Image: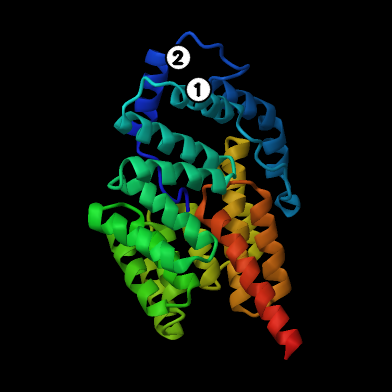
Amino acid sequence: MKKVKEEPEVYRIFVFALMGAVISGCAQLPNSSPSTDEAATTERSESRTQAQQTNADLAIIEPLEASRARQTEIAQITALLEGSQLNDEQRAVAYYRRGILYDQLGLPALALLNMNQVLELDPRFFDAWHYSGIYYTQHGDYQRAYEAFDSVIELQPEHDFVYLNRGLASYYDRQFDLALNDFADFYFQDPSDPYRILWYYLSAREVNEQRALEQLTSHRSDVVNHPWGRVLIDYFLGRVSEQVVMNAAFEGIETHRELLERLCEAYFYLGKSAAIEGDRERAMNFYKLALMTNIYDFIEYRVARTELYLLRDQESSAQGG
């Protein structure tokens, strides 16, 4: 899925405004502009992407580079936080923005540390609770994840992604009835979203496999403007092959980042299908490929490692038996 939770634009703009007002005289690190950094990455990768589109069979590609723009922004926010010019509300927003940047660079422990600092300053900062729940889910601390997500719902019942992420916590905690309830709420917010349809299906099949398949077939017709999402659904319905999925991942791609995002999704859902079929080795290989993309803030990246742990536990249990 595209993003676990899009950071509210107001936080980014607010921090940039603070930096402009407080540390405008500070020296910039090289290539500190986000647009410059991303444009350079795009330019360097265009020829690679065009070549890769001709051969989807060889889709093991260069992982995403760590953004220098994000690292520069972290340094700027750190300098801002070390000063005494900010009030508690401003400091909370700055810590939150820095936490999001750490998360986007694949440093979740540092991200969580910043979220904890946010919540010390403002316990009603629901987006910080939301990220904390995501972190605890990834690390198998489901009780703390539930508490964090429940705090979000108490503070912001209409939050866009909390039901998805609480559903994921219940799903990996094997509380499938609870997971299905949350995924249903998330699905009904936008029944045309193929990712909502897929997670609704994945949870529903743990409760009633045949009914879940019937619902997936029915829901597929609601996906109108998302050809890539339809391909993923068709794969679970057995209508297209693995090769069709991989070929589709390369269609309409303009940048290296976009290709990696597609491949992260493709590898994860191919792995999930293989796991459902009982092919643990093949599933594990797909999950490893998803992790190799370094698309840290995608759901598929986050839970691919959880899926790997589960498969390894199953393998150990089988060998022990």
* Crowd around label 2: few <14 · some 14–19 · many ≥20 (10 Å): some
For label 1, the crowd category at 10 Å Cα-Cα, with few meaning under 14, some 14 to 19 and many 20 or more, is some
- Say the numbered circle drawn on residue 65: none
Please indicate whether residue 106 sits to the left or right of residue 209 in the image.
Answer: right
Foreground of the two, 123 or 310 = 123
Residue 79, disc: 1
Q: Is residue 19 left or right of residue 43?
A: left
> Closest to the observer: 268 or 140?
140
User: Does residue 132 lie above or below 31 as drawn?
Assistant: below
| Residue 191 seen | no
Residue that lies at the very extreme toward the top in this rendered image: 25
Displayed quadrant of residue 319:
bottom right
Which residue position is annotated with label 2?
23
In percent of the image, x 40 and y 31: which residue is there? 94
Instruction: Examine the rendered structure and indicate whether residue 141 appears above or below residue 295.
Output: below
- Tell me the quadrant of the picture where the C terminus can be found: bottom right
- Seen at 64% across and 55% down, the residue is 290
Tag 1 or tag 2, which sits nearer the N-term? 2
Report the residue at 68% width, 36% height from top: 50
Q: Amino acid at mark 2?
A: Ile
Element assignment for label 1: helix
What residue appears at the point 57 percent right and 63 percent down from the top-left corner?
269
Q: Is residue 65 visible?
A: yes
Q: Quadrant of residue 125?
A: top left
Q: Are marks 2 and 1 in contact (CB under 8 Å)?
A: yes
Q: Position of residue 141 (x, y in %)?
A: 49, 65
